[in-house]
Image (cartoon, coloured by chain):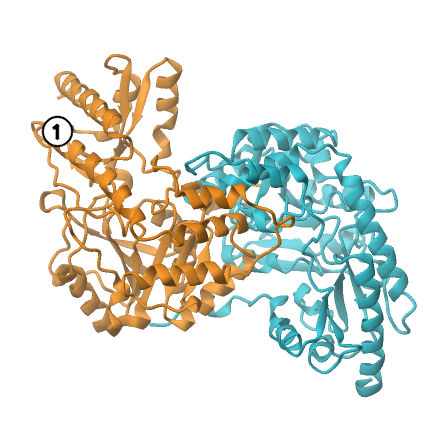
Chain colours: A orange, B cyan
Amino acid sequence: MNVSQRGRDIQASPIRKLKPYADAAKAKGIKVFHINIGDPDIPMPGPVLETFRNWTQPVLAYGPAQGFLELRQAVTRYFANYNIPLDPDEVLITTGGSEAIHFTFSVLGDVGDEIIIPEPYYTNYNGYAAFAGLKIVPLPLSVENGFRLPPVEALEALITPRTKAILLCSPNNPTGTVYTPEELDRVVGLVKKHDLFLVGDEVYKEFIYDGLKHKSILEYPEIKDRVVVVDSISKRFSCCGARIGMIITRNKDVYAAALKFAQARLCPPSVEQMAALAAYNMPMSYFQGVRDEYDRRRNVLYDGLKDIPGIVIRKPQGAFYVIVRLPVKDIEHFAVWLLSEFSLDGKTVMIAPAPGFYSTPSLGTDECRIAYVINVGELSEAIRVFKAGLAKYQALHG
Amino acid sequence: MNVSQRGRDIQASPIRKLKPYADAAKAKGIKVFHINIGDPDIPMPGPVLETFRNWTQPVLAYGPAQGFLELRQAVTRYFANYNIPLDPDEVLITTGGSEAIHFTFSVLGDVGDEIIIPEPYYTNYNGYAAFAGLKIVPLPLSVENGFRLPPVEALEALITPRTKAILLCSPNNPTGTVYTPEELDRVVGLVKKHDLFLVGDEVYKEFIYDGLKHKSILEYPEIKDRVVVVDSISKRFSCCGARIGMIITRNKDVYAAALKFAQARLCPPSVEQMAALAAYNMPMSYFQGVRDEYDRRRNVLYDGLKDIPGIVIRKPQGAFYVIVRLPVKDIEHFAVWLLSEFSLDGKTVMIAPAPGFYSTPSLGTDECRIAYVINVGELSEAIRVFKAGLAKYQALHG
């Protein structure tokens, strides 16, 4: 009577591994700045809140497995603003972006099949690859060149007969990189050449700075049938807890298979689907204010960190994260030390060690992800504390 | 570039297979009585609605992977009313009962392992067994004896070295049977003898009639560590669309493994968790009114059907379903015929053919599940229409 092998094998969330140390610090009365996570603090759009407050429906019945039609229509209107024509039947509402990843991985490959993902990458891909039995083949990128994609040969060298798909996340969590149209072109060519699917994680679409534009993989008509986009309202509308995401694909076989998985779990949450509907009905101008706020934070973070001796950092172009290399030998040790042995004026910081974002062993051991999802005042103070901590740690352990 | 084998293999929901026929009937202006599904029409408790209407929290942040502590505490108070002592750390909130089944199957067995389930059974077990690669070994029960469990030898004969668990659903969907303490004792003995887990689906706990009492498998201290209960607020509080369920287990290894799967999907929906909290804070007296209403419907249904010539029906004791045998050769054909070729006074009925609830081929081909989740007036009329349809069908195809 033992739990399953997979139940023993599945990785505990690397982001949550440090939580006990943070809890202990807080219990000692230390204020912990959370620059480790991307849980938005920006209020959600007013109409979302109003959806809850005006709720009158007395029974919460099962909805359609693919999500409410009104919501799927609103999503197509949102994409039309980006000149991406979609039909509501090309949108499948999921319980969070997590479930969109889960279904997509399950539909694109069988046990033992491979999916190529540039690393560092969003850790939860690992959990769903494990669920689906897919092997993630990492394409290592480097902080020195801002995590740009390598020449096509380096990518092509990873393709095997078991390769089913390539996944690109842009704007990228955890690196903050936004792929250029030229980088996308390179991957699109490969996908065509090797008869693969292309998965896009575009949940940070609106979080893009310096006047850059996000190009979606949905904008390549020549690979129309090969594209599956996983999306979510969590970051876009500050609704992480709503658990509303979606799969977008014009491939009818992929949609039909994902729908069967969706039927097994009956439907996504109904009240929060209606909240998502209100969110998608927001004018595009809504994003400008949010983007400006994150842009300010980005500048505060980058300007605060860039001159630290020994740091390697490239200015992030999108999302609200950056991966930096630090002059430390063991980032996990440093992260724990910050929480358990250091404080400045009763304050410390929690960072996300980068090894959790790499699947190649030994990569990222001197890197961490920093998220800029606290307000400018707190962020400035967090940077002051972080710099003092790093200096002290180097003196002790350098 | 094909979808995965599993994506092609996974069964489309058998309940939803008839939907196009129902839609076509409705398009012709025919009223369709839905006695095929268990989507409660009883309004949810007032405080649940008030939770939405009083919502003020401006950001929907990620919650804990195991669910909010307040909700898990409320669940333990609810179980305390049944004299079942639980700790909040023995309750893991999931996104619907569906996810509770998904995690439980994934944690208790590996690919190729077996789980014994009396059939007919809730069809969605199939989807999650497929996801987890578990083999469901059905224990065929029979309408003639009201789907009672067989002598222990019949059950024991199904146990192999790959058997990891037995699953019991009581009160049962789709049969309406409530297992007696003696039936449970039989299974508990086997579980101990063969070192297995026992999974209980107890989502219909309160829907129990004739003064019967529900005995939970959590009430057997001698198999404390072997028990995993999957539960849901969907039926209990008429909140199917809320997608709040839970796993209850005192086995710390099972809990820890399920929690790792839970971390991969981040958290259950937060607004609807708070709605569930309001629901679990309802006094136990709340259930009396709901039970009385379903009991009236049960009597109307049973009294309306029992004298049909050739029918085999046992009065259901719990849940809000019953499986009946009809004097027809092919229940699927009859179900489609009712929707596409029959109406009485502009009305017809939709039933759920039983083969979808059996995994042994050829079982249930003359049986259907009828749900009594419409009000007494509509139910009476549905029965009148159903009886006329059956008589006409027999005359044409009998």
Q: Position of residue A48 (x, y in %)?
A: 45, 45
Residue B153 versus residue B68: which sits nearer the camera? B68
Q: Residue at x 81, y 41 (%)?
A: B181
Q: Nearer the viewer, residue A317 or A348?
A: A317
- Other-residue count near label 1 (Cα within 10 Å), few / some / many at <14 / 14–19 / ≥20: some
Q: Is residue A310 something that shows in the picture?
A: yes
Q: Chain of mark 1?
A: A
Residue for point 14% across, 47% down: A210
Find residue B104 and report its horizontal and vertical position in percent.
56, 46
- Considering the image in quadrants, where does the C terminus of chain B appear? bottom right
Vertical side of A25 occupied by A14: above or below: below
Say which residue appears at 24% left-offset and 69% top-offset. Answer: A220
State the residue position of label 1. Answer: A327
Q: Nearer the viewer, residue B67 or B255?
A: B67
Query: Residue B251 at x, y = what percent?
Result: 58, 34
Q: Is residue B323 above or below residue A335?
A: below
Q: Is residue A309 left or right of residue A26?
A: left
Dot 1 amino acid type: Pro
**Near-viewer residue (B331 or A10):** B331
- Observer able to see residue B265: no
